[in-house]
Amino acid sequence: MTSRIPETNLQRQLTQERHRIHLIGVAGSGMSGIAALLLELGHEVSGSDKARSVETDRLRLLGLRFDQQHRAEDAADAELVIYSSAIKEDNAILASARAAGKPTLRRAEALAAIMAGKRGIVVAGMHGKTTTSAMAAHVLREGGLHPSHYVGAEIPILGSNAHWNPRGEYFVAEGDESDGTLRFFHPEHALVLNVEEEHLDFYADLAAIDEVFLSLLEQTSGMIFYCGDDAHARRLCAERPHAVSYGFAENADYRGADIELQDFASVFCVLRRGEQLGEITLNVPGRHNVCNALGVVALATELGVPFAKIAKSLRQFQHARRRFEIKYRSDRFLLVDDYAHHPTEIRATLATAKSAGRNRVLAMFQPHRYSRTKALSKEFGRAFDDALQVVVTDVYAASEAPIPGITGRVIADEMMEHGHRGAVYQPRLDRVHHEMGNMLAAGDLVLSLGAGNIHEQLSLLAADLVIAEKLKEIVGDAGDVRLYEPLSKHTTLRVGGPAQFWVEPRTEASFA
């Protein structure tokens, strides 16, 4: 049985007292944020994770005791153990803590308790939470409200993914609907971006998802901001007391108009209940991010931040890591990484890429979770229309057991069934950047898409492009430079793997 700290004591123990706390799975973006908050609150914190990350290195400098083994003895003196949703019940530290009768908390329980001492703002929805919560924290900070924050990714403009600010009343947090833990939050305000079928490894159906969102809404004491363009969010939120809508529809309380989508920015006007507030330049691309920004404008305006400060803050805002993040840019090529791993997100990201004005959009995609791949395979098949060519690799398990017959090929086949003529299945992840490199032509925009480690393949391609483009400068018009050229095309016996760089003179004179 799990021992619990009584709810009435939990907020006090986490924010007003000092304890010895251990975190299981501390390297993940969510748990590392909890560690950062606890360290800032003065607790003695240790953590374990099989993976080491940039965040664990940063947290060690702040006082985290980190180990890459899950050993029960490392947490023997801990008064409280906090664990992520990815941790199995038989984890040595978790099992030992429970056997000893120590309190154990899920990540969201700890976050909700820390937030309880402040005026909480929870950002919820299937897509766009990280960007929107980061945007909200930045705007409120620049507006002089000194918020604390908790966001699910590295945020350069905020300095870290989580921060406890004793000066301010507000706490902006990205809520996680994936495991039902939105139920733990009792915020003052909620910002609901969108609601649709997702995380079907946990939820039976959309009705079960609705129940969790309804719990959050019923436990929200103040305003509920919702995207009026999302039919399901509208259905859940519109009739709630103190509901405020935003979006592009004429009847939205906060409406975006005169939208100009540029390569890597957007310009739009904001109207509040028909009255024009002013113009905003958002240096983050995509119509979907204009909509996210409108939600933040609504929130900040209702909390008393002047529009001029909101507009200035949004002009300054920079993407979270892995959200349309430019990894390489030259006159010939543009490489962008994005966390998109659901069909809705993929469509939005590809639409943004298409609007960037490059000759072609190419994508490398790594499906995330077997359950999602199985449940949404047909939707995935229709999500890549804005990419001319797509390399699909195998599924990133994310701690799930394989499902027989469910691989990346399922998505590639669905794409071809849908009529896409550029789908390629490459089961070996380490060959994806080679496959993509063979497709490249000057003027291309290449995207890596997925919540796993597909971005590493884009980084390899970017590193090789740096060298290839320098070689092209040297060779000039006298020859061609290609990546990953199969040597089998140039040997008598037709054997040989890909050359990392291939330089071929155009004439005999070019050999000189």
Image: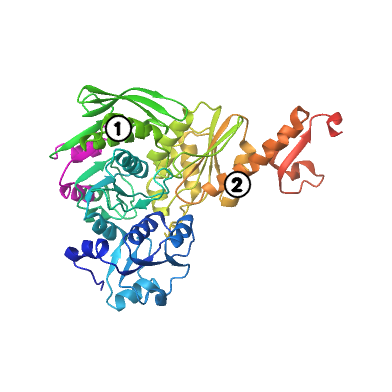
Q: CA distance from mark 1 to mark 2?
A: 36 Å
The residue shown at (61%, 29%) is 331
Please give the label number shown on residue 294: 1
Left or right: 85 as drawn, with respect to 463: left
Q: Position of residue 396 (x, y in %)?
A: 47, 53
Left or right: 489 as drawn, with respect to 267: right
Residue nearest the viewer, comparing 498 with 307: 307
Q: Is 270 covered by the magenta stretch?
A: no
Q: Position of residue 85 (x, y in %)?
A: 35, 60
Task: Give the SS element for disc 2.
Answer: helix
Q: How is the image coloured?
A: rainbow
Residue 396 visible in the picture? yes
Residue tagged by mark 2?
460
Q: Is residue 261 above or below residue 22?
A: above
Please give the label number shown on residue 173: none
Q: Position of residue 34 (x, y in %)?
A: 34, 58
Residue nearest the viewer, comparing 189 with 383: 189
Q: Quadrant of residue 124?
A: top left
Amino acid found under the numbered disc labelled 2: Leu
Q: Is 226 covered by the magenta stretch?
A: yes
Left or right: 170 as drawn, with respect to 346: left
User: Foreground mark, 1 or 2?
Assistant: 1
Q: Is residue 73 above or below residue 272?
A: below
